[in-house]
Image (cartoon, rainbow, N blue to C red):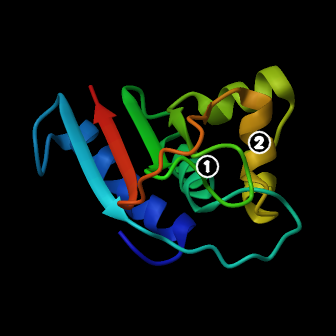
Amino acid sequence: VEGESKDAAKFFAAIAKEVSRTGTPVPKPACIIAGGETTVTIKGKGKGGRNQEFALSAALEISGCDGIVVLSAGTDGTDGPTDATGAIVDSNTCKNAKVKFCLKPEEYLRRNDSYNFFNNTGEHIITGPTMTNVMDIMISLID
């Protein structure tokens, strides 16, 4: 996976939604695994990294599609200038953020502020440095 993180996440989420709705290209239950390194064009003044941005963009795309979970994380244990390595989201992430925390996920994504979004929702993955740097990994589970 490469390219702009939020766009790559839309593509990744589209595959997960297709599996969920039609059972193609693989039947449910399914696990989709991808790797690589995306980029983020910073337009806002927020805090985050490419994996957190990927997860937030994916959360917006899978919102309301029950049975889909997406994880995006760096194998080195870090993501941008943060203590998180990524985040894990599901089809209820955006709804819960709006209802429970009065957050606007679209605004956090627009400001490149995924770290603070997930800091509020508690969906960060924090491992600390792993002393490896294979690539970033993206996983979707579809049930």
Q: What distance separates the C-alpha of mark 1 from that of mark 2?
A: 8 Å
Residue 100 lies left or right of residue 69; in this view the side is right
Give x and y (percent) for residue 119.
77, 35
- Which residue sits at x=47%, y=59%? 9
What's the mark number on residue 117?
A: 2
Give the quarter of the figure containing the N terminus: bottom left
Q: Mark 1 or mark 2: name the one nearer the start of the chain.
A: 1
> In the rendered image, which residue does mark 1 sit on?
56
Mark 1 and 2 residues: CB-CB less than 8 Å, in contact? yes
Residue 32 lies left or right of residue 106; in this view the side is left
- Which residue sits at x=36%, y=26%? 67
Quarter of the figure with residue 15? bottom left
Q: How many marks?
A: 2
- Front residue (pair 68, 76): 76
* Label 2: few (<14), some (14–19) or many (≥20) C-alpha neighbours in 10 Å: many
Give x and y (percent) for residue 47.
80, 57
Which element carries disc 2, helix, strand or loop? helix
Give x and y (percent) for residue 89.
53, 35
- Which residue sits at x=73%, y=29%? 121
Q: Amino acid at mark 1?
A: Leu
